[in-house]
Amino acid sequence: MLRKARRAGYGLLALSGVLHALAPRLSLRLAARTWLTGFENTEDVEPKDWFATAMRAAGVGMAAAGLAGFRLERPSTEGRTDDEQPAEVGHESPE
């Protein structure tokens, strides 16, 4: 169950990163609406150009991190044979 939750988190991170990378001003407008709830004239808030560029760069990083995490979460079957048994750690052998 925890593995499914991590995979879903990686997927959401990658999806959010793609949104930030492809449409940084749209994602900033959506974020401003949620962050500035309760304030007046939030539709008048306009990000500066450097901030939109920084948001795009952050989106690329988020997408890369989400995809890398999703890729590393897959079970590895490479280099494992059927006769290998997983080692038990922390248990002493009975004597």
Image (cartoon, rainbow, N blue to C red):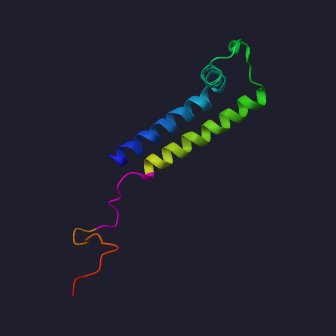
Residue 1 to residue 84: above or below: above
**Figure quadrant of residue 7:** top left
Residue occupying the point 71% across, 29% down: 52
Residue occupying the point 71% across, 35% down: 54
**55 is within the stretch colored magenta:** no
Residue 67 to residue 29: above or below: below
**Figure quadrant of residue 79:** bottom left
Query: In the figure, is residue 24 to the left or right of 49?
Result: left
Q: Position of residue 86 (x, y in %)?
A: 28, 69
Q: Position of residue 15 (x, y in %)?
A: 50, 33
In the foreground, 7 or 78: 7
Query: In the figure, is residue 88 to the left or right of 65?
Result: left
Q: Position of residue 68 (x, y in %)?
A: 50, 48
Residue 80 to residue 62: above or below: below
**76 is within the stretch colored magenta:** yes
Query: Residues in magenta?
Result: 72-80
Residue 86 to residue 14: above or below: below
Magenta part, dominant SS: loop
Residue occupying the point 77% across, 27% down: 49
Query: In the figure, is residue 20 to the left or right of 10?
Result: right
Q: Position of residue 59 (x, y in %)?
A: 61, 36
Residue occupying the point 21% across, 87% down: 95
